[in-house]
Image (tube, rainbow, N blue to C red):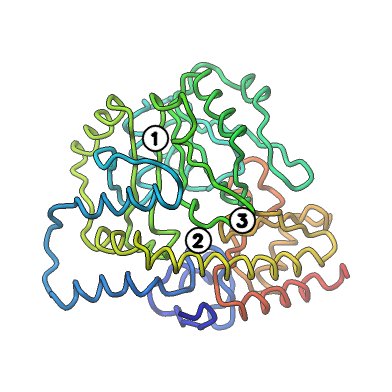
């Protein structure tokens, strides 16, 4: 397929394109939507073929034996990530925001503290707060445009009321791929403070050359408190299927999570299972490799263009399709630089403060779109901040 193809998404119930004017004031007719984390590309043909087979059959009943689906997940994790997954350890949730909320429900109590290393994916804090738990923000250190974890500071923050850590690996919004040493330090922190460690690894397939994602499950000594989360949805641009996996190797944790799933009456939708089984295949793997190459090209164009604007800095990233741009060097207020992006450049981007402490001077831009749009977005941003040149 050609990732350069422009596919019109306006008027298709796309939240990314059809809601940007209402939310950001960016005109629908000529705005560029770079906020919601889905891609403007069709998924691989193997997924479309699976959906076509369902359509041709014409009956959309309950999904039965899910053995091939579980085997596809196990195959993918082993061959792509060197991670051995037991089929019985897999729970299917309605996406990973739902997976996060289910973990909060299963493993914490109202009033408990749930730790986040901020800035981080904004949905975590939303579901934690909505569940009447306390969001504990441990702010990362921005060292010359690279986030680092300060465990001495985080140890001092802990009160004993915290029961869970939700960790983002690779990191959204910065695109950091954590080293083995950093993952070991996260695991040690969770053990020191007796925290359930939920590792959201939804972006693990979208890692650029020269970098290596290590699943938290491959870090020794953390099995008794580890919950892994992964999904096909970001990798293959099928977020609307609302399917994700919570993978738990520890029998006690698995029983607790399974009990909450049973109590909530949750079961997966068949569309998501058919699509995931088709995605986690050799054909899907070829498509992902081509996608990552294309995204890396977009990243380089976007970063070079943004970094050429005095006062702007796009954080160096090793994964994801989400650029995290620092506007602090402009000396402008958040309102001013946001207005320029939204009204002058006519680009919808996520507001940094929604990601928690440390995000105040940032905007997040989704560059998973045809390259011509990336070039145009860069030109618009350079014009909007032209007085700084």
Mark 2: secondary structure: loop
The image's mark for residue 351 is 3
Query: Would you identify the image quadrant in which residue 296 lies?
Result: bottom right
Q: Which residue is mark 2?
A: 37
Q: Which mark is residue 227?
A: 1
Of label 2 and label 1, which has the lower sequence position?
2
Question: Tag 3: Cα neighbours inside 10 Å, few (<14), some, or many (≥20)?
Answer: some
Kind of element beneath mark 1: strand
Mark pair 2, 1: CA separation: 23 Å
* Residue at the (44%, 52%) spot, across then down: 80
| Sequence-first tag of 2 and 3 | 2
In the image, residue 14 lies at what x, y percent?
42, 71
Q: Position of residue 197 (x, y in %)?
A: 45, 31
Quarter the C terminus occupies: bottom right
Q: Nearer the viewer, mark 2 or mark 3?
A: 2
Distance between the alpha carbons at the discs numbered 2 and 3: 13 Å
> Horizontal and vertical percent for residue 21?
53, 72
At a point 40% along the width and 27% down the height, the residue shown is 223
Up the image or down, 311 lies above or below 254; here it is: below
In the figure, 378 relative to 168: above or below?
below
The residue sitting at 24% across, 39% down in the picture is 88
- Left or right of 346, for residue 272: left
> In front here: 243 or 312?
243
């Amino acid at each position: 397929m050609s990732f350069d193809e422009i596919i019109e998404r306006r008027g298709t119930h796309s939240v990314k394109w059809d809601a940007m004017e209402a939310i950001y004031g960016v005109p629908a007719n000529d705005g560029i939507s770079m906020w919601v984390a889905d891609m403007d590309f069709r998924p691989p043909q193997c997924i479309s073929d699976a959906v076509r087979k369902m359509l041709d059959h014409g009956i959309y009943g309950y999904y039965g034996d899910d053995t091939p689906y579980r085997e596809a997940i196990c195959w993918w994790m082993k061959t792509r990530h060197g991670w051995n997954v037991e089929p019985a350890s897999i729970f299917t949730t309605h996406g990973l925001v739902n997976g996060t909320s289910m973990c909060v429900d299963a493993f914490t109590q109202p009033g408990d503290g749930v730790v986040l290393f901020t800035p981080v994916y904004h949905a975590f804090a939303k579901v934690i707060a909505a569940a009447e738990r306390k969001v504990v923000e441990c702010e990362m250190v921005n060292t010359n445009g690279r986030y680092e974890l300060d465990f001495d500071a985080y140890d001092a923050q802990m009160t004993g009321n915290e029961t869970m850590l939700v960790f983002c690996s690779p990191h959204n919004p910065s695109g950091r791929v954590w080293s083995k040493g950093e993952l070991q330090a996260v695991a040690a922190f969770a053990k020191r403070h007796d925290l359930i460690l939920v590792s959201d690894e939804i972006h693990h397939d979208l890692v650029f050359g020269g970098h290596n994602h290590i699943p938290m499950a491959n870090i020794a000594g953390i099995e008794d408190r580890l919950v892994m989360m992964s999904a096909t949805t970001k990798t293959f641009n099928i977020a609307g299927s609302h399917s994700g996996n919570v993978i738990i190797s520890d029998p006690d944790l698995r029983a607790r999570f399974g009990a909450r799933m049973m109590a909530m009456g949750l079961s997966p939708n068949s569309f998501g299972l058919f699509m995931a089984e088709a995605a986690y295949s050799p054909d899907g793997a070829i498509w992902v490799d081509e996608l990552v190459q294309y995204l890396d090209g977009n990243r380089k164009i976007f970063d070079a263009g943004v970094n050429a604007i005095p006062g702007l800095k796009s954080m160096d990233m090793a994964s994801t399709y989400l650029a995290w741009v620092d506007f602090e060097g402009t000396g402008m207020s958040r309102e001013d630089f946001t207005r320029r992006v939204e009204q002058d450049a006519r680009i919808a981007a996520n507001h940094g403060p929604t990601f928690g402490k440390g995000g105040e001077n940032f905007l997040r831009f989704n560059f998973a779109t045809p390259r011509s749009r990336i070039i145009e977005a860069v030109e618009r941003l350079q014009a909007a901040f032209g007085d700084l040149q």
